[in-house]
Image (cartoon, helix red, strand yellow):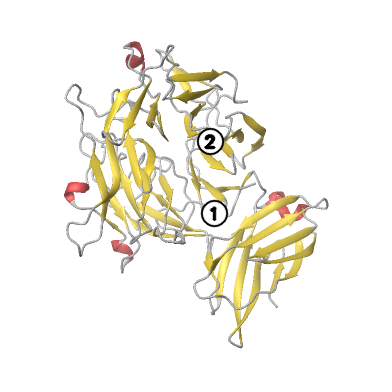
Amino acid sequence: MPRLQRKVCAVAASLLLLACSKNHSLTIKILTPPGMSDPFLLASQVRMVLGDKESTAPVDAGHFSATLEIESPATDQLTQLLVEALDGAGQVVGRGRTPPFALSLSDAEVAVYVGKPGQVTGSSLNLPDDSMQSAQGRKGLAACALRGRSTTPPEAGLGALIVGGESEGGQLSQRAWVFKPASFQLLDGGTISRGRRGALVLPSADGTLGQQALLVGGAGAGADLITPVEKFDPAVSAIKDVWSLPSTEIGDIGKPGMYQPAAAELQDSVFLLAGGSLDPASQDPSGQAVLVKRFPAVSADMLARVGVAVIPPPSDRNTAMVAPRHRHTLTTLAAGTLVFGGLSLPDITAKKPVAELYSAERNAFQALTFAAGEPPSRRGHVAAKLKSGLALIAGGYSEDALGQKTALASTLTIDPQARTFVLVDGALKTPRWGHSLHEQGGELVLCGGYDSSGQVLGDCEFLSSDTGQQSRPPSQLPMPRAEHLAVPLQNDLTMLVGGVGADRKPLAPIDFYTHR
C-alpha cells in the first residue's frame, strides 16, 4: 500500500511497490511555486493518478497524507504520475505530471512540479554562472527540448538543453546545462568551444540515436559571427566530450554567419534556419539559410551524422533568400515554409517582398505575391500554424526612419495557397514585440515582450489555435520578461528561460507554464 505525504515546507513523499515479495520505494518529490502561488494553499483535496490507479485525500492548510495501491510493474513499462489539487467545488487549482518513467523493481525517485493550470508560475530554479555556484542572468541564450530515439513507443527525452548566452556586462558563457524534469534539477551539460549569444540549438533524433542537438550560428565577442557548428551528444564516456565539432563538410554554415536566425521544423529533426543579422550592433539583415538534419552514413557500419547543409543562392541573386531578413518568422505549412516580415527600412522602401516561401522539394526560396496588395512588414513578431492550416502572425513592431519602434496589437492570418491575408487590428489586448509563443491544449500562449513605450511586459495573452482570436483573459507572469525562450517539455510544462526583466538586465529565474 503506497503512501504519499506532503507538507508546504517539506515536499518529499514516498510510495512503496510490492514486487517479488520485497518492498521497493518510489519517492515522489512534490515541488510547488513559492509563497502564496502554491496551489495547495487553495486546495481542499488532492487527487493522484498512476496508470489506472487513482486516489484522493483531504488537504488541510496545504498538508495532506494519501495512499495509492500499486501492483508489481511490468518490465520496462513507462508511466506518468498525475497530481492535482482540487478546491472545495472540485475545480482543479493545481496540476503536475511527472515525465514518463519506468516502475522498476528497485528504489527510485521522481519529481513533479504542481503549478496553477493555464498560468506561468515561479520556481526555485535559477540559471547558474559558469562555476555552477551562484545564479546569473542570461540573455541571447539557446535552448531546446531534447528528444529520445524515434521508436515505438518513443524514447523519453532527457529534458531541456540550455546553452551559452550573455550575462550583465557582456560576459559570454561557454557552459551548457540540462534541465532534467525527472529530478527538477539543472545538471552540467558540458562546455562549448566558444561563448555565443544569439545562436540556436536544435534537437536531433532518429530510430538509432537520440538526445543529440546541434548549436548553430550566433556571435562571439563584438561583431564576430561564429560559423562552425557544435554537436551535443550525452552518449559519451566523459563530460568533456559531450560537445564536439561535426565533420568539416557538414560542420560549418559558411560566411558571414547568422546572428538570431529564425527556424522552423520541416519534418522530424529536420530544421530550416534562415536570415538573422550580419552584425549584432547594426542588425543588418542576412539572407543566408541552412538545413540542420541527419546525413546518411558513409558506409553501412557507420551511424547517420547530424550536421548542416548550406542552401545555395540561385544564379540571379547572391543570397539564398529572396530578401535579407532579421526578426522575421518561419512557419511550416502545406504550401511550403512561410517566411514573413523582418525587412529593413531600405528593403521596404525598395519594395522587397514582405513574404516568401521555401520549397523543400526545390531547396529554394521564391517571393510570395499576394492577390490584392501586400500586408505591411513587421519585425519581432511571433507566428504559428492554425488548425485550419493557415499561418497566424501576432504582434511585432514597425519602425520609422529614425529607428523608433511602434509595437503592434494586430494579427495577420495568411493563406499562401490562395495568396490572401486578413489583418485584424487590436487582436491583442496589449501591443507587444519580443514576446514568446508556445502552443498548449488548443491555445497559443503569448508571454511578455515589450510594449509601445519599450517597457517589459509582465503578462501572457491566449489565442485559440482554431481561430487565432482571444480565448480567455490575460494572466500575470511572476515577473516581467522579454526576448526570452519558451521550451515545451514532455510533462505538460513549458519552461520560460532567459531574456531581460523590467530593468533590462538579464534574468536568472526560470518560470513554468502549466498545461490547463
Q: Residue at x 26, y 33 (%)?
A: 362
CA gap, disc 1 and disc 2: 34 Å
Q: Position of residue 334 (x, y in %)?
A: 41, 34
Mark number, residue 125: 1
Between 365 and 274, the one lying in front of the other is 365
Between 389 and 136, the one lying in front of the other is 389
Q: Vertically, is 20 above or below 346? A: below
Q: Vertically, is 60 above or below 385? A: below
Q: Given the image, on which type of amino acid does mark 2 rest?
A: Lys
Sequence-wise, the earlier of marks 1 and 2 is: 1
Q: Residue at x 17, y 56 (%)?
A: 298
Q: Residues within 10 Å of mark 1 (few under 14, many from 20)?
A: some
Which quarter of the image is occupied by the N terminus? bottom right
Q: Position of residue 303 (x, y in %)?
A: 25, 60
Q: Residue at x 54, y 48 (%)?
A: 494
Secondary structure at numbered mark 1: loop
Image quadrant in which you'd find residue 404: top left
Mark number, residue 335: none
Most extreme residue toward the bottom is: 21
Image quadrant in which you'd find residue 357: top left
Q: Position of residue 339 (x, y in %)?
A: 38, 28
Does the CB distance between marks 1 and 2 fall below 8 Å? no
Q: Please give left or right for residue 456 compared with residue 144 in the image.
A: right
Q: Position of residue 23 (x, y in %)?
A: 62, 83
Q: Is residue 127 among what the camera can see?
A: yes
Q: Nearer the viewer, mark 1 or mark 2?
A: 2
Mark number, residue 387: 2
